[in-house]
Amino acid sequence: MSAAPTAAPGDRGRATYDLGRTAIFSCRSDPRFSYCLYVPPSLAEGETADLMVAVHGTGRTSFLDFRDGLSGFGRWNRCAILCPLFPVGVLGDGARSGYKYMAEGDIRYDRIVLDMVAEVAEKYGQDWSRFAMFGFSGGGHFTHRFAILHPDRLWAASVGAPGSVTLLDPSRDWWVGIRDLPDRFGIAFDADALARVPVQMVVGDADLETWEITHREGSPHWMEGANEAGRTRPERLAALKASFETAGVAVRFDLVPGVSHDRMKVLDRVEDFLGAALARHRRERTTACA
């Protein structure tokens, strides 16, 4: 691992752009994609930190909201926040939702995130072989599907208000189920590894609009069973909870009173969950090293 960027008196550039709320960087492995971070300033003094990846929704602007909105959590818990940006229409077709389903054309979005994590771990001299992930709306799509594919890389997952869910159903193909994971992704589902990941599912009880989440035959991500997990986001997330629990996963379910589809109004619940998960992760790491 390389040394972390330092805030030496003559290096104001690194102090300004690589620490705290950083600039936006292109991804080294695929410059079509970019990211920004919140990096605790203490890393300039050689300290270690943990990592959370926060994934935006369809509007994409939340990638900055999450960097800034979670910066206090990051500062006081020594946790860097990595916020990827997956632009609309990266294949030139105007498609908004490809990243939510992990694969689009020749793009594997799960691998892009893993590349970003490896890039920033090297840059800041950290061991981020495991990290937490939080996503809301489209980011909630991404987070629970990433957890299904890569549970061994996560120390926590917080799934916020996804419009559609992938149930752990071995009788149906992706994205409704997981039957064809080996053929589609070259990955076998590991229920034991997923059961070791603390999982939160969070949604407002007033998040009831269905215009954006009802799949219609002929639409880009239509497939049989696309709407069977429920009509609204709370119903679909409850179905995902039941599916995960059947597989042995312990799920904290937060149905937030009076909240509609508002990412910023669930962040306090997310920080509460992630703070406890981070403390557990650090205890387990200390025990393993003893």
Image: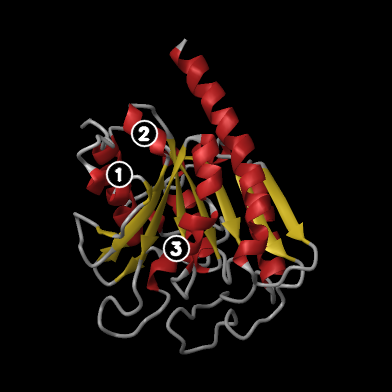
Q: Residue at x 71, y 52 (%)?
A: 253
Q: CA distance from mark 1 to mark 2?
A: 11 Å
Q: Earlier in the sequence, mark 1 or mark 2?
A: 1
Percent across and percent down for residue 201 are 65, 54
The local crowd at label 3, few if under 14, some if 14 to 19, many if 20 or more residues have their Cα within 10 Å, is many
Percent across and percent down for residue 108 are 30, 61
- Residue under pointer 1: 15
Dot 3 amino acid type:
Leu
The local crowd at label 2, few if under 14, some if 14 to 19, many if 20 or more residues have their Cα within 10 Å, is many
Q: Nearer the viewer, residue 108 or 49?
A: 49
Q: Residue at x 68, y 51 (%)?
A: 269
In the image: residue 44, left or right of residue 61: left
In the image: residue 129, left or right of residue 197: left
Q: Earlier in the sequence, mark 1 or mark 3?
A: 1
- Residue under pointer 3: 64
In the current view of this chain or complex, which residue is farthest to the right?
257
